[in-house]
């Protein structure tokens, strides 16, 4: 459906929301002692509690009706069977095929997708085994102990996030580093102190045309050859590529025997489970990488099979629609109570905002609703001492996703007999509780608070959150979490009638940067600039660089 906001289902939800605005979470929990369990579900190993949302059971059925009216089940099925749902690029969208089992079958546009996916996984596995066993060594015969992934966007954020998340599973003494920014500080800081003889660079770029990645890769190659004091022949022992573009890889000087491929039906931000995850596989091994993929598969199956009312990615996405379009929320905070998931909010920013940051529908008409939630966040408990004040007492409604784990991968006694992980998790549970239920003026006054301070201490509560709890942070649970959010993107994009799989909006800035470069270097001060603001800035820049 093109104009979803004109649908009867949208209108029904709008009417229903008025009744929700008359109640609050305290009352909803008081009225229904079974609410906590009624609004909680399992998706694979994820225990997902939606009960601290501003919803009643009827809201869930109205959200499911809206998803149905928008065609979410049809769009999900079309995606999974390889229809060209990325219409502006005329491409299939098949990240789900990247984790399909070897025995499944899927042919798309005449290509046996499953055979290709497992062919690449086998190639990655063989290379991974060779590096981890020491059979593949650097040019001087040293074992590879450091991997530097050079990539940006989807070719960086996914593997960087997952390598951090699975730090405890890195079992072969291989450390992964990530360089993305064209700011030279990134490469310089990363290479500082690295031993070239034991370092392997992975140049990861779907297109192999990305300015940042190619600049960093060329600079890294120069660094390597200078450090080793050898000729280009050393490159084959220290550089591999991950790309869909063999021609460009060869042009760059990387032997395509050292290239791991993927396909145009894998979007950059959906590619961590493709060869883009090579750095992950090198650090945790091919068996644990298989567990990671199996985790995705669990949630893919749930998304495919669960009724919409009990479908976790559908509900997660539809609750985002509810707050964005019916409560006027501007953003969602993602709060992992796991330091190893520190990069998860940044990863989600690309996944969700590059996907659904669109204002034109699939039919080319402007959208009639707000789209694209703004995701942001930091790990708990750090965020508590930074921005939670605004979450608790500020004027904005900011729904939160709390993510936590029961069993720590590492624990330390805090010194008084309590494990630090329990301290972390008591904060996790406390925050969702305090956001939901707050503390009213009577309760605060009853504690003996002086009356002039009471209004300052009132905690309004009624602030919604999802709590996602898993037993532990494993390759599988990380895969499950990623798939959960990948699918909520499709759900929301479908409701808003937009294409979550293109990203035309990032192109103009890239072109303009190229045009401005001669003005930046001073080669042609008039290049690219047409406005007095940019002209002035460029003049000041050149003056400070001695290029006036
Ligand atoms: O993998 P590539 O082709 O280098 O692209 C990197 C990133 O750049 C983007 O195209 C946006 O600039 C992302 O979608 C992508 O993940």
Image (cartoon, rainbow, N blue to C red):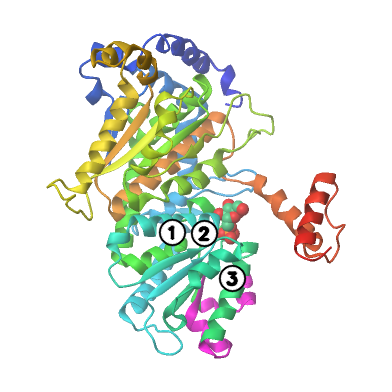
Q: Residues within 10 Å of mark 2 (few under 14, many from 20)?
A: many
Q: Nearer the viewer, residue 310 or 182?
A: 182
Q: Position of residue 324 (x, y in %)?
A: 51, 26
Distance, label 3 to label 1, CA atoms, is: 21 Å
| Ligand 1 under 8 Å from disc 2 Cβ | yes
Q: Which residue is mark 1?
A: 159
Q: Position of residue 285 (x, y in %)?
A: 32, 67
| Ligand 1 under 8 Å from disc 1 Cβ | no
| Ligand 1 under 8 Å from disc 3 Cβ | no
Q: Which residue is drawn at the image coordinates 28% and 62% (left, top)? A: 169
Q: Which residue is mark 2?
A: 155
In the image, the segment drawn in magenta is 228-257
Q: Residues within 10 Å of mark 1 (few under 14, many from 20)?
A: many
Give SS at disc 3. Answer: helix
Distance, label 2 to label 3, CA atoms, is: 16 Å
Going from the N terminus, do you reach mark 3 or mark 1 first?
1
| In the rendered image, the vertical position of residue 339 relative to residue 247, given as above or below | above
| In the rendered image, the vertical position of residue 361 relative to residue 118, given as above or below | above
Give SS at disc 2. Answer: helix
Q: Which residue is mark 3?
A: 246
The mark tally for this picture is 3
């Amino acid at each position: 459906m093109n104009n979803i906001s004109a649908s009867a289902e949208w209108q029904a939800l709008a009417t229903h929301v008025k009744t929700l605005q008359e109640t609050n979470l305290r009352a909803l929990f008081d009225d229904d002692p079974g609410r906590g369990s009624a609004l909680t579900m399992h998706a694979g190993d994820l225990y997902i509690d939606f009960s601290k949302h501003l919803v009643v059971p009827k809201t869930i059925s109205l959200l499911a009706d809206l998803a149905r009216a928008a065609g979410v089940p049809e769009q999900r099925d079309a995606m999974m069977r390889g229809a060209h749902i990325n219409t502006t690029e005329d491409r299939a969208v098949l990240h789900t095929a990247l984790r399909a089992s070897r025995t499944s079958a899927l042919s798309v546009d005449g290509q046996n997708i499953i055979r290709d996916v497992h062919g690449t996984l086998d190639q990655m596995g063989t290379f991974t085994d060779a590096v981890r066993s020491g059979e593949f060594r650097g040019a001087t015969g040293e074992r590879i102990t450091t991997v530097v992934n050079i990539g940006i966007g989807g070719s960086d954020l996914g593997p960087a996030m997952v390598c951090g998340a699975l730090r405890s599973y890195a079992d072969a003494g291989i450390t992964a580093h990530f360089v993305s920014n064209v700011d030279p500080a990134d490469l310089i800081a990363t290479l500082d102190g690295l031993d070239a003889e034991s370092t392997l660079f992975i140049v990861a770029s779907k297109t192999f045309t990305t300015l940042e990645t190619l600049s960093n890769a060329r600079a890294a190659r120069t660094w390597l050859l200078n450090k080793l004091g050898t000729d280009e022949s050393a490159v084959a022992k220290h550089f591999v590529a991950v790309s869909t573009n063999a021609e460009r890889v060869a042009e760059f000087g990387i032997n395509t025997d050292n290239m791991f491929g993927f396909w145009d039906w894998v979007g950059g931000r959906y590619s961590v489970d493709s060869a883009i995850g090579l750095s992950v596989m090198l650090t945790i091994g091919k068996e644990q990488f298989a567990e990671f993929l199996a985790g995705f598969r669990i949630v893919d199956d749930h998304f495919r099979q669960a009724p919409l009312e009990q479908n976790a990615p559908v509900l997660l996405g539809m609750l985002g629609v509810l707050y964005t379009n019916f409560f006027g929320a501007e953003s969602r905070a993602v709060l992992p109570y796991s330091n190893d998931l520190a990069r998860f909010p940044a990863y989600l920013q690309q996944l969700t905002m590059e996907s659904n940051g669109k204002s034109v529908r699939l039919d080319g008409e402007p959208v009639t609703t707000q789209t694209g939630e703004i995701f942001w966040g930091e790990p708990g408990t750090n965020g508590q001492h930074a921005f939670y004040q605004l979450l608790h007492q500020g004027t904005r409604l900011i729904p939160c996703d709390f993510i936590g784990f029961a069993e720590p991968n590492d624990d330390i006694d805090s010194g008084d007999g309590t494990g630090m992980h329990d301290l972390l998790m008591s904060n996790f549970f406390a925050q969702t509780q305090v956001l939901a239920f707050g503390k009213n003026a009577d309760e605060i006054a009853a504690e003996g608070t002086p009356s002039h301070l009471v209004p300052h201490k009132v905690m309004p509560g009624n602030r919604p959150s999802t709590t996602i709890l898993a037993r532990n942070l494993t390759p599988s649970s990380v895969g499950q979490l990623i798939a959960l959010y990948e699918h909520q993107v499709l759900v929301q994009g479908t409701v808003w009638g937009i294409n979550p799989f293109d990203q035309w909006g990032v192109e103009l800035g890239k072109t303009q940067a190229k045009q401005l470069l001669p003005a930046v270097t001073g080669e042609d001060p008039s290049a690219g600039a047409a406005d007095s603001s940019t002209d002035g800035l460029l003049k000041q820049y050149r003056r400070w660089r001695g290029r006036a």
